[in-house]
Image (spheres, rainbow, N blue to C red):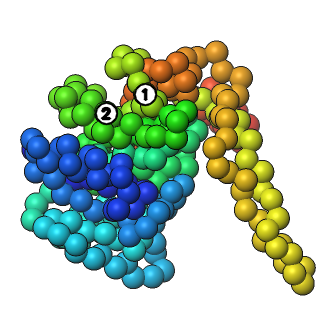
Amino acid sequence: MTILLTNDDGFEAEGIKALERVFSEQHEVWVVAPSGNRSAQSHAMNLSQPIRMTKYGENRWHCSGTPTDCILYSLRGGLFPRRPDLIISGINHGANCSSDILYSGTCGAAMEGVMQGIRAIALSVEKGCDGSFGFEEAARFALSSLDKLISLTAPDSIVNVNFPTPHSGRVVPAEVGFIDYPDKPLPVTEEDGVISLRLSGGDVEKNIHHSAAVTDLHITHGGDIAISVVKVLPEINREKQQEIEALFS
C-alpha cells in the first residue's frame, strides 16, 4: 500500500518521523509536510501567494504553506508518481479532541485528503505526565490496526484517533463536545495605540462544556485510545432548519 504522510508540526517533527520509520517497514511511504510548525491552521489554504515545495528525498517534500496546501498542491500539482492509497496525518504533538478538531491543521489536512477523494486518518498523541510523547507506541498501534482503521474510513469522513501517553491499548468509540479553553489573550507590547497580544496557551487543562456524553477527552484522560469518525462537511441543525420556511415565508 502507498501511504502519504502529512502533519501540521512540520516535516522535521518527531511524530511524523516515527510514523515514517514504522510504516516504511511494511508499506511504501511518501511525505509532504509543512516546512515548519503550522499548528492550529485548521483547513486554511493560501490563495494570494505562491507555494514553495522543496524536495528533500525520494517522494519526500516540505511545503511553505499550510497542512491543507501540502495535500492540495502535492496531489493537484503532480509531485508524486500516482495517487496514494491512503493519507495519514500526524502524529500530532498533542491531542486533537472534540472542538480541537475545528482548529487542528492535522485534521484539516486529513479532511482535504477526503475532499480530494482519498481515505484519511488523523493521529494525535497527548503528552504524558513526564513530558514525553508516546509516538513510537502510537505508530506501532496504528500499523498493527491499519486494516481496522481503514475499514472505518468513508468518502465523507476522517478517522480521528487520539492516544494518551501511556495508553492502555483499549479502544473506545468517542463522541465529541465543546471544550472550555482557559487560554487568555495577554498583552505583549503596547505602543502608539497598538496592542500586541498572545494567547497564554501552553499546557492548559481542558474541560468539556456541559456534556453528558463520553467524549474523546474523557476517554484519553482515562488512559484509553479514543476513535471518532468525523464528517468533513458541517452538520445541519435539522430542528432549526425546519423553522426557516415558516420564519421567512
Q: Identify the image quadrant of residue 69.
A: bottom left
- Residue type beneath disc 1: Pro
Horizontal arrangement in the rendering, residue 228 relative to residue 239 (left or right):
left
Q: Nearer the viewer, residue 181 or 116?
A: 181
- Res 137 label: 2
Residue at which label 1 appears: 166
Residue 14 left/right relative to 30: right
At label 1, counting other C-alpha atoms closer than 10 Å, the crowd grade (few under 14, some 14-19, many 20 or more) is many
Residue 23 in the image, given as x and y percentages of width and height: 18, 44
Query: Is residue 142 visible in this depiction of the protein?
Result: no
Q: Residue at x 58, y 38 (%)?
A: 99
Which amino acid type corresponds to the residue marked 2 in the rendered image?
Answer: Glu
Compared with residue 140, is residue 38 higher up or lower down, i.e. above or below?
below
**Pointer 1 and pointer 2: residues touching (CB < 8 Å)?**
yes
Quadrant into which the C terminus falls: top right
Residue positioned most to the front: 130
Would residue 120 appear left or right of 127 to someone viewing this image? Answer: left
Q: CA distance from mark 1 to mark 2?
A: 8 Å
Using the image, determine if residue 150 lies above or below residue 65. above
Residue shown at 9% from the left, 65% from the top: 81
In depth, the one of 136 and 213 nearer the eye is 136
The mark found on residue 248 in the picture is none
Question: How many tags in the picture?
Answer: 2
Quadrant where the N terminus sits is top left
Say which residue appears at 74% left-offset and 41% top-offset. 182
Disc 1 is placed on an element classified as loop
51 on left or right of 243: left
- Residue 217 vs residue 111, the one in the foreground: 217
Query: Residue at position x 20%, y 48% from top?
Result: 21
